[in-house]
Image: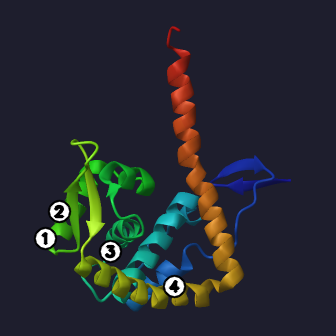
């Protein structure tokens, strides 16, 4: 049986009959705006991940009371707290962030007396990162605030839903590893040994 999708006859194509992006439209109506039609965007993983990220980050930011209000800042502070003496390179690799972006975060943390850079005793080119006492207290407050944020997510998804989502997100994170591996092997294909 052929079904019309986007004006094209596709064998076996199934179209959802539910209204597209109904939450976005409902929010827009409450704000007095008319939401635009999103077409099939809500059927794309990337689009829905981005929408979910925006909602989760907004809730996280609203929950935080201290100077570490953004999820990225929290991640950096948390990893430094769990790994005193971690190098900036290790931190970048762990969190998948660019060194230039990390430098600005660490500069900000130093200005707030949350973290400090210490020259490495074994490699003069690298710095080791540690939280200050103020940084430890700030991290603890952020962790306390995080529990309210996580509780709202748990209420929305349930325990099984949260675990399933985390498992699926971890699988999606593998895409970056697969892409990097295939890029490396294609680069090696052209080299002379």
Tell me if residue 33 can be seen. no
Identify the residue under disc 4: 150
Using the rendered view, name the quadrant where residue 36 is placed: bottom left
Instruction: Select label 4 or label 2 by which is in front.
Output: 2
Which mark sits nearer the N-terminus, 1 or 4?
Answer: 1
> Is label 4 in a helix, a strand or a loop?
helix
Distance, label 1 to label 3, CA atoms, is 17 Å
Q: Residue furthest right?
A: 1
Please identify, in this view, whether the residue under mark 1 or under mark 3 is nearer the observer: 1
Instruction: Name the spot of residue 7 as percent of width and height, x first.
Output: 64, 53
Report, in whole angstroms, how far the alpha carbon at label 1 lies from the one at label 4. 29 Å
Q: Residue 111: which disc?
A: 1
- Res. 81 image quadrant: bottom left
Q: CA distance from mark 1 to mark 2?
A: 6 Å
Location of residue 107 with respect to 134 vertically, above or below: above
Instruction: Give the quadrant of residue 189.
Output: top right
Residue at 57 percent across and 66 percent down: it is 42
Q: Nearer the viewer, mark 1 or mark 4?
A: 1
Which numbered disc flags the more N-terminal residue, 1 or 3?
Answer: 3
């Amino acid at each position: 049986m052929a079904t019309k999708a986007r004006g094209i006859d596709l064998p076996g194509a199934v179209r959802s009959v539910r209204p597209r992006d109904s939450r976005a439209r409902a929010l827009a109506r409450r704000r007095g705006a008319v939401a635009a039609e999103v077409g099939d965007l809500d059927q794309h993983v990337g689009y829905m991940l981005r929408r979910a990220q925006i909602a989760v980050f907004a809730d996280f930011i609203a929950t935080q009371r201290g100077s570490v209000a953004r999820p990225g800042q929290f991640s950096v502070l948390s990893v430094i707290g769990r790994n005193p003496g971690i190098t900036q390179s290790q931190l970048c690799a762990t969190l998948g962030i660019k060194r230039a972006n990390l430098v600005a975060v660490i500069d900000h943390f130093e200005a707030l007396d949350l973290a400090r850079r210490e020259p490495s005793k074994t490699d003069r080119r690298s710095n080791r990162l540690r939280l200050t006492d103020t940084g430890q207290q700030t991290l603890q407050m952020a962790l306390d605030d995080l529990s309210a944020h996580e509780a709202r997510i748990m209420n929305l998804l349930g325990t099984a839903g949260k675990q399933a989502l985390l498992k699926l997100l971890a699988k999606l994170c593998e895409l970056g590893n697969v892409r990097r591996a295939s890029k490396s092997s294609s680069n090696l294909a052209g080299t002379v040994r």
